[in-house]
Image: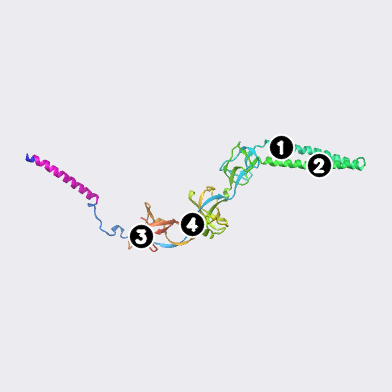
Amino acid sequence: MTKSVKAPLINAVVKPLVAIVLLLLMVAWMAGVFDTKLQPGINELTKGVDASNALEVTRKTLTIIEPVPASVEAKYATLISSRILARITAIYVRAGDIVNKGQKLIELEKSDLIAKYEQAKENIKAVNARLIEAKQNLIRVEKLNKQRLVALVDVDKARANHTSLTAELALAQQQKKEAETALSYTEVRSPINGRVVDRFSEPGDTASPGNQLLSLYNPLSLRVEAHVREQLALSLQVGQSLNVDIPSLNKTVGAQIDEIVPAADTGSRSFLIKARIEYAEVLLPGMYARLLIPAGIENSVVIPADRVVQVGQLNVVWVLQDGQSNRRFIRLGKAMANGEVEVLSGLSEGDLLLQAK
């Protein structure tokens, strides 16, 4: 009876103790109590660093470039419209098409203008026939007058009739020319070599004078236009070469200043700069660009980009210090075309930079 009572008491005490001990051991393991401890100091693996490839950090004089928002525009652009009121019968181009100077773009209804032109031609024939008759009559009357068979007043009448018909013939010829000119307006032709930007009408629409039908631009005459702050704009000159960054194409093209508008915008205190850019097929009017303008010089720490390692969002280099390789975090600036990169902080002039690991 005594043994049977002690057994439950032992189980009730031992089991909680065992659970507590296991829990303590688990907490100690998670805290690293059983891990091998490393003594403070330099790891033996960093000893014996090869310093033959160490590069001394130096400062270089760099040009400060200020990017100014700009847009690509066409220097030679035109809006096509009709000079007469007529229905559109055909449009031969669409947006994006390349056209040549003199190429037919739009055709308008011309049946009534053809009728007027033919009427003018027939009117010339009729007046010309009457003029021939009047000239012959004048010759006869003048001969009879010399023979004193007709009065001088008859000669004057014949001469006046001839002069009147001569003027009427000239008027008919001008009417024919006017009808011919109006008929030529039914064919709208391209005034430049270029590309169609957009078309604003379709066959069946009525074209009226002044209303836009098409818009064209010359792709060889693209330029960038930017509003540059006055302090920076005053340092620029016509003919100066600059670079233009096209972010959407990840491309930089050359540019040359064509024009500096000699009046500042009173609201933004900036000058409008227009710079001609090199031709590229992928460039289109309206694209966003950045005009890269020199804004001064500065002395900066510059290192080769291949000696920088990116760890997540951090940039790391290895510096030789006291014969040991030390990891150092740095903050980078702008990258350069020669494979170097500017260091804003983390390195000083004279530091010895090792190859990236």
Q: Main secondary structure of the magenta part?
A: helix
Q: Earlier in the sequence, mark 4 or mark 1?
A: 4
Residue ID for mark 2: 164
Q: Secondary structure at mark 2?
A: helix
**CA–CA distance in space, label 2 to label 4:** 76 Å
Comes first in the chain, label 4 or label 3? 4
Quadrant for residue 164, please give it.
top right
Q: Which residues are magenta?
A: 4-31
**Magenta-span inclusion, residue 25:** yes
Q: Position of residue 224 (x, y in %)?
A: 54, 52
Q: Are marks 4 and 1 in contact (CB under 8 Å)?
A: no
Mark closest to the chain's N terminus, 3 or 1: 1
Residue annotated with mark 1? 116
Q: Which mark is residue 319?
A: 3
Q: Do residues under tags 3 and 1 come within 8 Å of each other at their CB atoms?
A: no
Q: Quadrant of the N terminus?
A: top left
